[in-house]
Image (cartoon, helix red, strand yellow):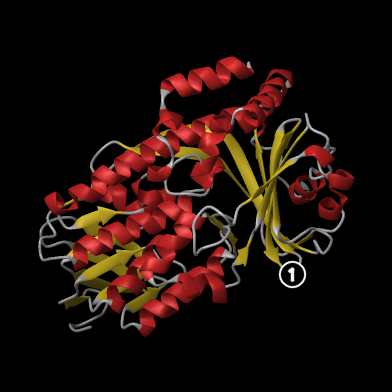
Amino acid sequence: MSGACGPNHRSQTSGVDVVVVGGGIAGASAAAYLSANGMSVVMLEKQEHYADIVRGEWIAPWGLREAQVLGVEDAFGVGGAWEIREWTQWDETVDPAEAETVDMTRFVPGVGGPMSFPHHTVCELMAEQAAANGATVVMGAQRTHVTKGVAPVVTYTKDGEAHELRPRFVIGATGRGCTIGRQIGVSMATSVHHWGGGVRVSGLDDWPMDVQAMGTEDDKMFMVFPQGDGHARLYINFPTENKDRYRGQEGLTRFIADFELASLPDRGKSVYAAAVPVGPLKVWPSVAMFPEQPIVTDGVALVGDEAGNADTVLGTGLSCSLRDTRTVCDILLGGDDWSPAAFEPYLDERRFRMHRLHFGAGIIAKLHCEFGPDAAERRRKARVLMADNFAAQVTGLLNMVPPEEVPDFGFSEFFAERLFRETV
C-alpha cells in the first residue's frame, strides 16, 4: 500500500479489481475463485483468527458440486469434512427400530453424501488458498465501511491504522449481521419460527459416524451431525418462548442432558453420557431474512446470508452461499460490464431459488419444529402419508439436490394444503 499512514492519514490503494468483505465460506471461496482466475483481490475478515462460530457445518451434495466448480472442494476435505452416508429420521411417534433411514449418497452423481465439518478450519484453508492464488488476505480488519458507486470506496482499520481501497467492485459477504447490506441501504424483513442451539463434542465413539440423526421429541427437534473420529455437532431447535432454556452456567449441561431421548436407540446414551464439549455452546433465533431492496447496486453485490436466507432447519445455507459466489464471480469474470443490469441473471436465479427454499423450510419447520400432542399427531400422519405416496416427500429433496431440480408441484399452495389437510 502507498501513501502516508499515521493518526491523521489514511493509506490508499487503487488498482484492485474486487474487494471481498467477509471471510466466511461465501467470501473466502469468492476470493479463492477470482484470484485463481487472474483478478486482483483483497479479502477483509474481521476476526484475527478463525474461531468456532457454531453454525454452518453441514453442506448438501448440491453445495459440494458448487464447491467443485469453484475449485475449493479440497478445503473441505483437508479441513476435516466427513461424508455422512445415511440420514435417520427419529420421532417420538415411532419406535427407534422402525425409524426411516435414507441413503444420501445417491442424489448427485460424482459427489456422494453431504459433508459435516468444522467451519472455522475450512474457512481458514480457503483463505490460505486465496492467498496462495495471489489475493491479499487481511485478518483483523475492523470498522469496514463501503461506499457504493461506479467507483466504490472501502475503508477499514487494521492495528489502529486507517486504510482505503478503491476497487472496481465489492462483494459483501459478512453474513447475518448484514454489515455491508445496511451500509448500501438494504434492509431485511425477518421472521422467527423457533430458536436453536449447538455445540461441538467429542467422545461419541459408539455413535455410527456415517449416520446423521434428526428427530422431534417433546419440545425439542434434535440433530446429531457426525464429523468423524467420535466428533459431532449437536443441535437442538426449541420453541421461541423457551429461548432462555440453555442460558446460564448450567446451560451446556442441560443441553447435552436433553439428548436423553426415548426416540433414540438406547435412549440416546451414546450421546448424552459420552459427549465431551470441545467448543462453545451458542443459541440463536432461527431467522429467515428477506431483502427489501435489490442486493446488487452500483459497485456492490451481496452474497450468502448477507443477501437473505431461509430458515436454518432446511440446512441449505452453505450451499446457497456457494451458488451465490459462483454466479456472481462468473459474471465478473465473464466481461467488463459490471453494472447492476449485468447481474440480473443472478437476481432472477436467486429469487427463484429462495422462493423454493423459503417454501420448503416452512413445510419442514411446521412438521418438525412445532411441538405438543397436535404436532406429534401431524408428524405421525405425515409419516404414514409419505410411506404410501412417495410424492409427498418431495420437499425433502431440497436437502440433497438443487432447488431447480425439485419437481414444481412441491412448491404449490395446493400441495401444502393437501399435505397438511391429510396430516392434521
Q: Position of residue 210 (x, y in %)?
A: 70, 60
Task: Place residue 97 in its image quadrant.
Answer: top right
Q: What's the residue at 61%, 29% (across, down)? A: 367
- In the picture of the structure, the residue carrying the numbered disc 1 is 229
Q: In the picture provided, is 164 more to the left or to the right than 266? A: left
In the rendered view, tell whether residue 420 sits above or below residue 394. above
In the rendered view, tell whether residue 13 sits above or below residue 44. below
User: Who is closer to the viewer here, 220 or 252?
Assistant: 220
Camera sees residue 204: yes
Q: Position of residue 13 (x, y in %)?
A: 19, 77
> Label 1 crowding class (10 Å Cα cut-off): few <14, some 14-19, many 20+?
few
User: What is the secondary structure assignment of the residue under circle 1?
Assistant: loop
Q: Position of residue 118 (x, y in %)?
A: 59, 65
From the image, which quarter does the C terminus lie in? top right
Task: Place residue 411 in its image quadrant.
Answer: top left
Q: How many circles with numbers are drawn on the protein?
A: 1
User: Who is closer to the viewer here, 224 or 156?
Assistant: 224
Circle 1: residue type: Asp
Camera sees residue 43: no
From the image, which quarter does the N terminus lie in? bottom left
Q: In the picture provided, is 265 more to the left or to the right than 120? A: right
Q: In the picture provided, is 84 more to the left or to the right than 260? A: left
In the rendered view, tell whether residue 343 sits above or below residue 246. below
Q: In the picture provided, is 16 more to the left or to the right than 366? A: left
Task: Place residue 159 in its image quadrant.
Answer: bottom left
User: Who is closer to the viewer here, 73 or 201?
Assistant: 73
